[in-house]
Amino acid sequence: MPRPALTTITTPLPAGRASAARLLGVTAASLAALLLWDASGLDLPLARWFGSAQGFALRDAWLFEQGLHRGARMLSWLLLAVLAAAVWRPVGVLRRIDRPARLQLVATSLLALLAVALLKSTSHTSCPWDLSMFGGSAPYVSHWAFGVADGGGGRCFPAGHASAGFAFIGGWFVLRRAQPRAAFRWLMASLAAGLLLGLSQQARGAHFMSHTLWTGWICWTTAWLCDAMATLLRARFGTRREPHAIA
């Protein structure tokens, strides 16, 4: 009599737990990649593409100073004001999510901006244009040298300006269940905006690439934690869905 074949029975993770595991994996993998970038020492060679011992030629260029710095910052605050108004008067794709999700988007963006600003305010790391190798007076000190001042102005890590784009990453979390395509486009736009603003500041000598990358990771992690908290609150207290919302 033939022996029955052995069958392995596996129980898949519930959808919520599987999603949480994937997000944890993405967050951990991006952190590992970021640490590898820091260890590579590529910040300085990349900064030398734009600067020299005479400084940064593009520091006061109109496109970078007025357009991509001041103008982009004002546009970011305007977008945040529009999102705040949309909590009660939703427009576009925001009509497809309920009010608590829209409120989560605004809160996540503000918390991401606040997290980056608080870290900057306590940082001893100076901007590249303050360093002696780029015409300043301060020696280079890694941002990993906690508590060690380089003698410059400090408060340059992570990149505050890049957060004007990265802070809106939270839109992916609130849209991904109801509108996955719109969520993907929102995520790509937020990442592209953050990178563009970060690179524009690097061209001016205001930041190293690692400053921008760390800002992106901080904003992503803030959005992830906010979404996890919002999910717990929904499960515990429930939410009343609005008639027009799908989520």
Image (cartoon, helix red, strand yellow):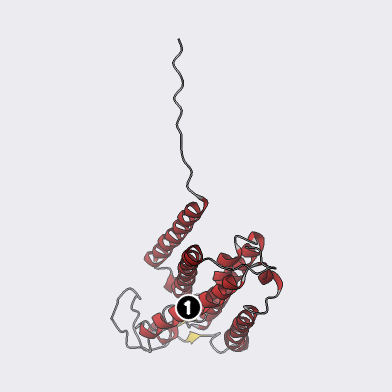
Q: Residue at x 62, y 64 (%)?
A: 183
Image vertical order of residue 45 relative to residue 178, above or below: below
- The spot of residue 93 in percent (x, y) is 68, 69
Q: Which residue is mark 1?
A: 111
Q: Amino acid at mark 1?
A: Leu
Pick whichever, 102 or 240, lies toward us.
240
Secondary structure found at label 1: helix
Pick whichever, 246 or 122, lies toward us.
246
Tally of marks: 1
Pick whichever, 167 or 198, lies toward us.
167
Image vertical order of residue 143 relative to residue 224, above or below: below
Q: Residue at x 51, y 80 (%)?
A: 110
- The spot of residue 138 in percent (x, y) is 35, 86
Residue 16 at least partly seen: yes
**Picture quarter containing residue 168?**
bottom right
Q: Quadrant of the N terminus?
A: top left
- The spot of residue 30 in percent (x, y) is 45, 61
- The spot of residue 145 in percent (x, y) is 30, 76
Image vertical order of residue 204 relative to residue 95, above or below: below
Label 1: how many Cα within 10 Å (few below 14, some 14–19, many 20+): some
Q: Residue at x 51, y 65 (%)?
A: 234
Q: Quadrant of the C terminus?
A: bottom right
Residue 195 at least partly seen: no
| Furthest residue in direction left, as rendered | 147
